[in-house]
Image (tube, helix red, strand yellow):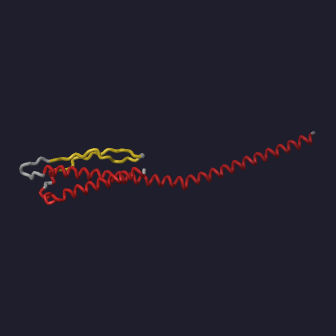
């Protein structure tokens, strides 16, 4: 469980670093982004599936559908098509990072709960059961000793009665 949490955390961090790097790469054309019409592209649908890891349902990003509006290539700057590709890539990276962060949260929560249960069993319940088993063993040993003592008394009385009768 810890390994899966670490994997998810590392992947979220890796995606976050890639996202920051991509934003920095496009920082040089930042002043051009003021001309870009953000209404031309939007996220239409995000498709997620569920994957169970150690009994925990975690999200997996399957695909992201974008809704791209038609626009005139001739009336807009030539870099608009590249801008669409950049925005799609950044949005996909951001969504994937968010999915891995959520996965990390879910797995970490499950790991904490599992650790609490293990500690409860190891430190509270198992020692309590061992103590109860020890008490039961002692009680059964006492019962057995009393039974043997009773048998010896009965045997000695029977022998005494047999010797008296003889």
Q: Residue furthest left?
A: 74
Q: Residue furthest right?
A: 166
- Horizontally, is 158 left or right of 98 in the view? right
Q: Residue furthest top?
A: 166
Q: Residue at x 56, y 52 (%)?
A: 126
Q: Residue at x 22, y 58 (%)?
A: 24
Residue 14 image position (x, y, % from top left): 31, 54
- State the count of labels: 0
Q: Residue at x 40, y 54 (%)?
A: 108
Residue 95 image position (x, y, % from top left): 27, 51
Residue 92 image position (x, y, % from top left): 24, 50
Of 28 and 48, which appears nearest the observer?
Answer: 28
- Horizontally, is 149 left or right of 108 in the view? right
Of 118 and 146, which appears nearest the observer?
Answer: 118
Residue 133 image position (x, y, % from top left): 63, 50
- Horizontally, is 95 left or right of 58 in the view? left
Of the 4 image quadrants, the one containing the C terminus is top right
């Amino acid at each position: 469980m810890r390994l899966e949490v670490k994997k998810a955390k590392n992947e979220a961090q890796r995606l976050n670093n890639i996202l920051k790097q991509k934003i920095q790469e496009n920082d040089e054309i930042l002043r051009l982004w003021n001309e870009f019409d953000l209404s031309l592209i939007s996220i239409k649908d995000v498709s997620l599936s569920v994957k169970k890891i150690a009994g925990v349902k975690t999200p997996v990003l399957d695909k992201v559908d974008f809704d791209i509006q038609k626009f005139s290539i001739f009336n807009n700057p030539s870099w608009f098509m590249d801008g669409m590709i950049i925005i799609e890539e950044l949005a996909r990276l951001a969504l994937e990072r968010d999915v891995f962060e959520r996965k990390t949260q879910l797995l970490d929560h499950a790991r904490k709960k599992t650790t609490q249960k293990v500690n409860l069993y190891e430190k509270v319940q198992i020692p309590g059961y061992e103590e109860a088993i020890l008490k039961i063993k002692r009680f059964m040993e006492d019962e057995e000793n009393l039974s043997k003592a009773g048998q010896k008394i009965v045997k000695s009385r029977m022998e005494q009665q047999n010797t008296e009768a003889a």
